[in-house]
Each structure stands twice: as structure tokens, then as C-alpha cells.
Amino acid sequence: MFGENTYIVFDETKECVIIDPGCSNTYEENIVKEFIETNNLNPVLLLNTHCHIDHILGNSFIKQQYQIPFYINQHDEPVLKSGESIAQMYGISYTKSPVPDKFIDENDIIKFGNTELNILFTPGHSPGSVCFVHHDSKAVIGGDVLFNGSIGRTDLPGGDFDILQNSIINKLYILPDEYVVYCGHGEETIIGNEKHNNPFVRLVNR
Ligand SMILES: [Zn+2]
């Protein structure tokens, strides 16, 4: 119902991490499951870029299905805990997310298979938003920080435009122009495009 993007990141070893499983019913859960089976993947880690309800709806399913560790940034723990009341507010069914097995921060590196993901702490849309960067393929799993032609909303509890703007300028816009950002909603974009054309946060004459 939210149109949220789930990412399954894997390499030649077939180990994969599941990021932001938004699946909220059996139909959507089966899409994730079948993708993993069809590609012979071996899930090793569940990650959330942040813990808004649309990004955590499938946490419980993934944990139950694959019994893998679950990591978030600590500053989004209150957001995760508010999941049940938010789901009630929206009138949607939500199986409570597992509690995180570990908190991740900017200096940590996510390792699986032959792959390393670097972490950027990018608060503003939520207090504990993070982005996962894969430098080898010039890719960023960006959550709801920066969108194609837009930015994450800052009117939800814990949101702050100035902090978000700072995250975008000082963490994302310093990446090379050709880096692709895979967003939590909608189409992907590239850093260079947003840096110059984003209507909300852009760098002028740089
Ligand atoms: Zn969000």
C-alpha cells in the first residue's frame, strides 16, 4: 500500500542481504521468497535503512523465514518501537518487528560474501537513517534520504529539514557524480543529477 522498494543485494557467492522488506501480505512475501529461491540465494543479514512502518512491515517475516541477524542504527530504535501504534493509526496489519541484534554506525562495514557495504549516517528524514554504499559498483542504497527529483519528508516525528539537508550535502553530494542512488520509493537516480537539479537540496555553481 506504500509502494516501497525492497532491495536484495547479492554477489557471486550467492550470499545476500535483505534491505527494507516492505512486504505486508503473503503475495508480497512470496515475491521475496521466490526471488531468493530462483536465484539460489543464501540470506545472511536483514538491514533497515530506517524504521518507518513501510520499511519494516516484512521484518518479522524475514526473520522468521531465514533466522538471520537484524541491524539498524540505534537512533531509529524509538521509531522501530512505535511501529505497532503507527500501524494501528494507518489501520494496517503489522506483525511486530524483531528487536535488532546489533546497532550499526558510520564506521562499521557490512560484510557478506565477497562484498563490503560502507555505512553513511544520514539523519533528517528519521533520526537514525543510514545509507549503504557499495563503492565497487558505485551504488548507494539510500532509503528515504534522497529521491529522484525529491528528498525524504521531514514532517514525521524525529524529522528535521536542516539535518536532512546537511546529510544530503555532506554525505551524499560528496560522492562522485556517477554514483547511482537506489531509493526507498520510486526510480533510482544519480548523484550528479540531484546535485545540480534537485528542487529541494542542490549545489549551485559547483
Ligand atoms: Zn521513511
Image (cartoon, grey):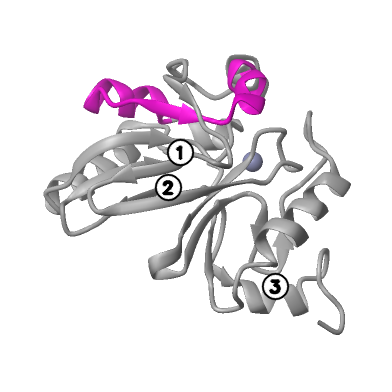
- Nearer to us in this view, 33 or 172: 172
* Amino acid, disc 1: Gly
Q: Would you say residue 6 sits in the magenta stretch?
A: no
Q: Residue at x 61, y 33 (%)?
A: 52
Name, please, the residue furthest toward the bottom: 205
Residue 9 horizontal/vertical position (percent): 33, 52
**Residue pointed to by mark 3:** 194
Q: Secondary structure at mark 3?
A: helix
In the image: residue 109, left or right of residue 67: right
**Residue pointed to by mark 2:** 6
> Where is ligand 1, by quadrant?
top right
Span highlighted in magenta in the image: 58-82
* Amino acid, disc 3: Glu
First-in-chain label (1 vs 2): 2
**Residue pointed to by mark 1:** 22
In the image: residue 16, left or right of residue 55: left
User: Do the CB atoms of the residues marked 1 and 2 lie less than 8 Å apart?
Assistant: yes
Q: Main secondary structure of the magenta part?
A: helix
In the image: residue 176, left or right of residue 71: right
Q: Residue at x 71, y 41 (%)?
A: 123
Question: Looking at the rendering, in which quadrant would you find the C terminus?
Answer: bottom right
Q: Secondary structure at mark 1?
A: loop
Q: Residue at x 25, y 22 (%)?
A: 67
Residue 91 location, quadrant: top right
- Nearer to us in this view, 39 or 2: 39
The verdict on label 3 being within 8 Å of ligand 1 is no
Residue 19 location, quadrant: top left
Badge 1 local density, few (<14 within 10 Å), some, or many (20+)? many
State the CA–CA distance, disc 3 to disc 1. 25 Å
Residue 35 horizontal/vertical position (percent): 22, 50
